[in-house]
Amino acid sequence: EEGVVPETPKKKKDVLELEPGSFVVHRDYGIGIFKGVVKREIRGKVFDFVEIEYANGERLFAPFTQLDRIYPYGGKPLKLDKLGGTSWKNLERKIKASMLKFARELAVLYKERKTAIGERIIGDKEMIKKFEEKFPYRLTPDQAKAIRDVYEDMESDRPMDRLICGDVGYGKTEVAMRACMKAVSAGKQVAVICPTTVLADQHFQTFTKRFEGFPVRIELLSRFKTKKEQKRIIEELKEGKIDIVIGTHRLLQDDVEFKDLGLLVIDEEHKFGVRAKEKLTRIKKNLDVLYLSATPIPRTLYSALSGFRDISLLETPPPGRKGTKVVVSKYSEDALKSAVERELKREGQVFIVHNDISKLPEIKKDVEDFSSAVV
């Protein structure tokens, strides 16, 4: 079922820019082959149509008013749908029924978590205090409040469901690490899940350095680990020899078991599908869960979410941190040249991100040409 209708439909113009022969999905008729845009005369007037070929060579001429119902198809389908056939409608009904079933299961899960009696995690106060004292910076007011909120949640008899939201560099990870120390010092295991192997590795390095000198064992589990290493880590998780495991979707697989999981930390939680997150929280319905996100949460969304999830906002930048200036404008080589030259003159660094990898060599050459004079 996955991949039939892309989760994020592309813009209308993307369909028109497809090469003839590309696979597309029409919401009403299913998967076909994009043949191009054709002109057809109707009652003396010429109109543009999107031509799509279906099974048995049948053709659909979709008017431009239906562009919002046509999407590029990712991958190669097993077979094309038939115009007027039942396969696409049956699949659509099946998906809707599956979504409805999942929504009901989700509602039951949230109800169970809301009524569940959680484990009160107090932890070793002396060890927690030493860990806090080793933090080399001063906490921002928002960080301090978020930490108090998390501690109170963990010490209560209800499962924690708290979202820590703040810009990059505002201290979400420190809040999470203090929660981890509180759980570990109470004899509980912690799982930290990240959407990418790069982020998981970064967290592993950060956690390893921050927990140095404390009797806390941390491991990294991802697909980049050898089969032998993965097997060892999974066995030691089950035996309770590992205190904190940091990983990617690998932690979601059925062979991963914990001896006594007490806290789940999900970083960049908006990048995980609902099924992925709920699979983890199903491990224990009374599990404390801490979500981290750098995506700004509007106040209206805050109000909407607060009914089932608590939120702590980190809005105060650390001392000495300067805000980011954002300028949105039409691309101009002169503007790019000016920005690069200005940054190089102050001996700074420049990161250029482009959405088309094929154009990177051309951009690289342009930047080298006009930056060599500055350097």
Image: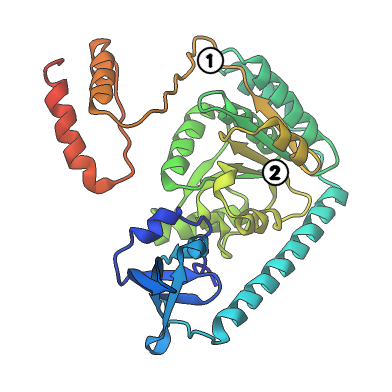
Q: Nearer the viewer, residue 375 or 169?
A: 375
At horizontal 54% and vertical 10% (from top left) the residue drawn is 319
At horizontal 46% and vertical 67% (from top left) the residue drawn is 63
Give the CA distance from mark 1 to mark 2.
26 Å
Which amino acid, mark 1? Pro
Q: Position of residue 262 (x, y in %)?
A: 71, 45
At horizontal 74% and vertical 40% (from top left) the residue drawn is 305
Q: How many marks?
A: 2
Which amino acid, mark 2? Val
Q: Is residue 216 above or below residue 247?
A: above
Residue 85, image quadrant: bottom right
Q: Is residue 15 above or below residue 248?
A: below
Tell me, yes or no, if residue 344 can be seen here. Answer: yes
**Circle 1 sits on which residue?**
136
**Circle 2 sits on which residue?**
289
Q: Which of disc 2 and disc 1 is earlier in sequence? A: 1
